Image (tube, rainbow, N blue to C red):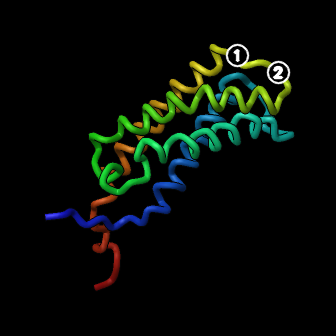
């Protein structure tokens, strides 16, 4: 018997974006960097682009995978693979070089954050929240 899912897939996509935004803003906050001027976009946009290019190839947007918490490893692997691409794209935007420790730190924090989000999503996506509606 197949499990019915009640949360629309766009919530998953929006959640992915919010996780990447949170990782970016946390990194800037951790380094006491100002958010004014939009420099944070030089990290956020490459991260979103890299995630968007890598994640679908590993099944992160196939319902048979995102519906199961045990498949959250796919998000971890996708982010580990996306981080070097994000670092490269960031270096292109800034006109600099790729900083390996930055790629490792960004990839590690983003991979763990995305994996945690995907586990939470898989656990909540199948819950019927119809009790919140008037009967």
Q: Quadrant of the N terminus?
A: bottom left
> Which residue position holds label 1?
99
Between the C-alphas of marks 2 and 1, the distance is: 9 Å
- Residue 128 falls in which quadrant of the image? bottom left
Q: Are marks 2 and 1 in contact (CB under 8 Å)?
A: yes
Element type where label 2 sits in the image: loop
Q: Which one is in front, 21 or 86? A: 86
Q: At 62% across and 32% down in the image, what residue appears? A: 26
- Image quadrant in which you'd find residue 50: top right
Q: What secondary structure is marked by label 1? A: loop
Residue 23 vertical placement versus 132 (above, below): above
Quadrant location of the C terminus in the rendered image: bottom left
Give the farthest residue toward the left.
1
Kindly identify the residue that appears in the image at 36 percent across and 46 percent down: 120
Q: Badge 2, how many Cα within 10 Å: few under 14, some, many 20+?
A: few
Residue under pointer 2: 96
User: How far across and down, in percent of the image, does residue 121 sit?
Assistant: 37, 51
Q: Is residue 64 above or below residue 29?
A: below
Left or right of residue 43, residue 38 in this image:
right
Q: Nearer the viewer, residue 115 or 129?
A: 115
Disc tally is: 2
Q: In the image, residue 94 lies at what x, y percent?
A: 83, 28
């Amino acid at each position: 018997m197949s499990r019915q899912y009640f949360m629309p897939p766009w919530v998953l996509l929006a959640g992915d974006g919010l996780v990447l935004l949170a990782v970016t803003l946390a990194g800037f906050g951790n380094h006491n960097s100002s958010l004014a001027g939009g420099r944070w976009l030089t990290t956020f946009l490459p991260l979103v682009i890299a995630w968007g290019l890598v994640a679908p190839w590993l099944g992160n947007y196939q319902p048979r995978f995102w519906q199961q918490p045990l498949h959250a490893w796919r998000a971890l692997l996708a982010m580990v693979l996306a981080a070097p691409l994000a670092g490269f794209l960031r270096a292109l935007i800034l006109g600099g070089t790729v900083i390996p420790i930055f790629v490792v730190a960004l990839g590690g924090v983003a991979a763990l954050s995305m994996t945690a989000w995907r586990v939470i999503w898989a656990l909540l996506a199948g819950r019927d929240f119809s009790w919140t509606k008037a009967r």
